Image (cartoon, rainbow, N blue to C red):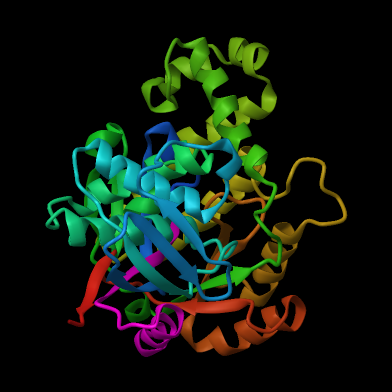
Amino acid sequence: MFEEVKNGFRETYQCEPEFIFSAPGRTELSGNHTDHQHGVVLAAAVNRKCVAAVRKNGLNRVRVLSKGYHSFEVDLNDLEPNEMEFGRPSSLVRGVASKYIKDGESLSGIDVYIISEVLSGSGLSSSAAFEVLFGTIFNELYCGGKYSKEDIARIGQYAENEFFGKPCGLMDQMASSVGNIIFIDFNRPEEAIVKPIPFHFEECGYSLCIIDSGASHEDLTDEYAAITQELKKVCKVFHKEFLREVKEEEFYAYIKEVREAAGDRATLRAIHIFNENKRVLEQAKALEENNFTRFLELVKASGISSWHYLQNVVPTGATNHQDVALALALCEKALHGKGACRVHGGGFAGTIQAFVPSEDVDAFVKEMEDVLGEGKCHVMQINPDGGKLEETLQ
């Protein structure tokens, strides 16, 4: 990829790049939708990267071309959110740059050519990788590298919330920025506790697979937003802002009032969050103790809870197209009672996750792709690094 991205830069800008940067995609191992409720998650960076060739251009503009997409420019003199730009990659660059400048940093223009293996809608969080990529570029080139990986993750979340128009949590950015397998406690998001988990799936005889259901995340922002909005209604019953602040025993003591105020779906979603936070702690402990059997049991439980209680497998009202649900059914069949599978990330579209016995991987991939199509099942490895400067070329 490095040679390809260098050549792409030369063809685009007619000069040599000065730096190569990268940021990985991520997969959520446990903690489905717990992050935005200040809960706990288990996540990992994967070996699918967003790679950029970069050169300072002496202008006050960021010029970007990603392979397969249209080019765009961001004027560093114009760094206010614009609803007309919501959902576009330019808004993420603008948001990241805006946060640095608000923090008192002096940025200047760059030319950037990007090749990404973290494709949009892949379920590996292409937006977070993109944000972390630019956060890392600005940090290294103009801030002396003084911002931590956790800081860069928060800058990415700010860009996605305020400029991209998506009310996401912080898990995606943190996993992409920090790298490897990490446990994150978001009880105080501004000081999130990040703990590395030393574990290698390959050594326990299982491989991590990501399966593309074929459904796009496009036009699903309202579905994602509904989860946070409904949980806010639950929290309001207890005069709290996030579910982490609500005591579980108090929630059940007043569950009738919760149903009346927020509705049954919101109540079920809250039940998922309470249980999922406990599962994350158990799964982190299982990995630390090398108890992969217990970890898989909890993966299955997480998947069932996401489907039944969180309800982020099938978009509201969808009947003819239930891509994620079908992919999960196919996955369970292909596993033949072994391993585990679950929806992960935002849900509703994109990908699912499976832990497959390594000796069965080839047969599993074939069975999934016979139905879903070639190239839909990806065998992943954990990426040890987060966003980083890969090479200084000049």
On the image, the x and y values in percent for residue 303 come to 57, 53
Up-down: is 307 above or below 339? above
In the image: residue 73, left or right of residue 215: left
On the image, the x and y values in percent for residue 373 come to 72, 80
Count of marks overlaid on the render: 0
Q: Quadrant of residue 372?
A: bottom right
Viewer-closest of 81 and 206: 81
Residue 15 within the magenta-colored segment of the rendering:
yes
Up-down: is 265 above or below 127? above
In the image: residue 221, left or right of residue 125: right
In the image: residue 120, left or right of residue 263: left
> Which image quarter is the N terminus in?
bottom left
Up-down: is 382 above or below 89? below
On the image, the x and y values in percent for residue 217 come to 65, 54
Q: Quadrant of residue 6?
A: bottom left
Residue 280 in sight here:
no
At a point 19% along the width and 61% down the height, the residue shown is: 140
Looking at the rendering, the stretch of residues picked out in magenta corresponds to: 1-29
At a point 56% along the width and 73% down the height, the residue shown is: 338
Viewer-closest of 298 and 239: 239
Viewer-closest of 171 and 344: 171
Residue that lies at the very extreme toward the right in this rendered image: 320
> Which image quarter is the C terminus in?
bottom left
On the image, the x and y values in percent for residue 360 come to 55, 86
